[in-house]
Amino acid sequence: MHATSRPLPVFGHDEDRNGEQHRLLSLALDPLTTERLALTGIGPGWRCLEVGAGNGGVAAWLARRVAPAGSVLATDIRPPARPPDVAGLELVRHDIVRDPLPEAEFDLVHARLVLRLLPERLAVLDRLVRALKPGGVLQLDEFDATDAPALRVPDPAAHRLYRTFMETKAQIMDGEEVDMAWGRKAGAAMSRAGLTEVSSYHRFEVWSAGSPGLQLVSHHTRHLREKFIRAGMTGRQLADVRDLLAHPVFRARSYAIYSVQGRRPREGRGAPIASTCPPPPRTSTPRWRASTGPPARNSIRSWPNSSASASPRSTAARSACRCTRGRRWKREKARNAWTRSHPGRAALCSPARSARPSDSPRP
Ligand SMILES: C[S@@+](CC[C@H](N)C(=O)[O-])C[C@H]1O[C@@H](n2cnc3c(N)ncnc32)[C@H](O)[C@@H]1O
């Protein structure tokens, strides 16, 4: 396996703690994530990239949607020990900041709660945009975790305890360069990175005892215990926080979850995607070879050995693209007109694309 020297971010190395965190994230967020992904028109034959895949649940959902001809490459700096066993899904160990990434390769790129963790998030965003084929779609699902107040508490002391806990957590995250407000900034950053049709959706929930959201918060009293203690909280206080979160009266407003989509402009339309950041240092030879077919089931490989496709488009492909540019532009114009006349629908979902999977955002 490819060994990366990069230290892991705030949530550390512990497999059990990370496994539980990913299980709870799936419970809390997979319904929203997959509902939004479905709006892109994803279907058979698409080539997808899932970055920071966690337990691989979303990657498995993508692989089922694109089967039988499509495929999903799922990456994580620390892939799960037992990845989902789904045909067409390949999981690789890969650092999205430092390891090579093919360009113009994917119809759809998705990352959830990854960029907020990375100080290099804008450079990474740039790389994700360039990994898209022209016309391909990027979806980022991210928290704005700056404010999640208690709404109902059993007594005033509980109110203070919860506030202390959440403020200490924000302080820990801040110290590790996690951007707690990244969710609300993601849309503007995606536009600046050259994406068009950027559409943002966000939602709050009310958390109560037993909800996946509060289970996650409760899990953090253990997952980040050492960091809370270093930041001044006691073991007793952390135990009290767990009791409070399990109290039948307790209610809190959730973090805001943002789900933002944007499209890489098709060739010949809009400004070319320009890198706003210097390329990251390369850790291995960036030679991408043509894919030899769908990946085997249940595989974890290190990235540089994977069979990612060549990024440069052939001369023939480029001239074919120039010939069809006029027709594409007309199709795009019709789609934009439809979107304007259906303001309630997401910009990335058009009847043409849902009805005809072959009219996918591929070049
Ligand atoms: C908060 S978890 C989210 C997991 C999953 N996306 C989800 O929402 O369930 C962040 C994930 O990003 C991965 N990660 C962190 N830094 C990374 C990096 N530099 N490159 C790739 N993955 C990274 C972690 O290993 C972890 O699986």
Image (cartoon, grey):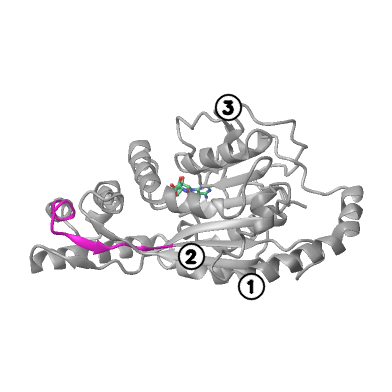
Q: Would residue 273 be visible to someone looking at this image? A: no
Tell me if residue 112 is in the magenta stretch: no
Mark 2: give few (<14), some (14-19) or many (20+) Cα within 10 Å: few
Q: Nearer the viewer, residue 88 or 75?
A: 88
Q: Does any atom of ligand 1 lie closer than 8 Å to the CB of label 2?
A: no
Mark 1: give few (<14), some (14-19) or many (20+) Cα within 10 Å: few
Which callout, 3 or 1, points at the residue further toward the start of the chain? 3
Q: Nearer the viewer, residue 105 or 35?
A: 35
User: Label 3: which residue?
Assistant: 297
User: Label 1: which residue?
Assistant: 340
Marks 2 and 1, how far apart at CA: 17 Å
User: Label 2: which residue?
Assistant: 201
Marks 3 and 1, how far apart at CA: 42 Å
Where residue 296 sits: x, y (%)?
Answer: 62, 26
Label annotation for residue 291: none
- SS state under label 2: strand
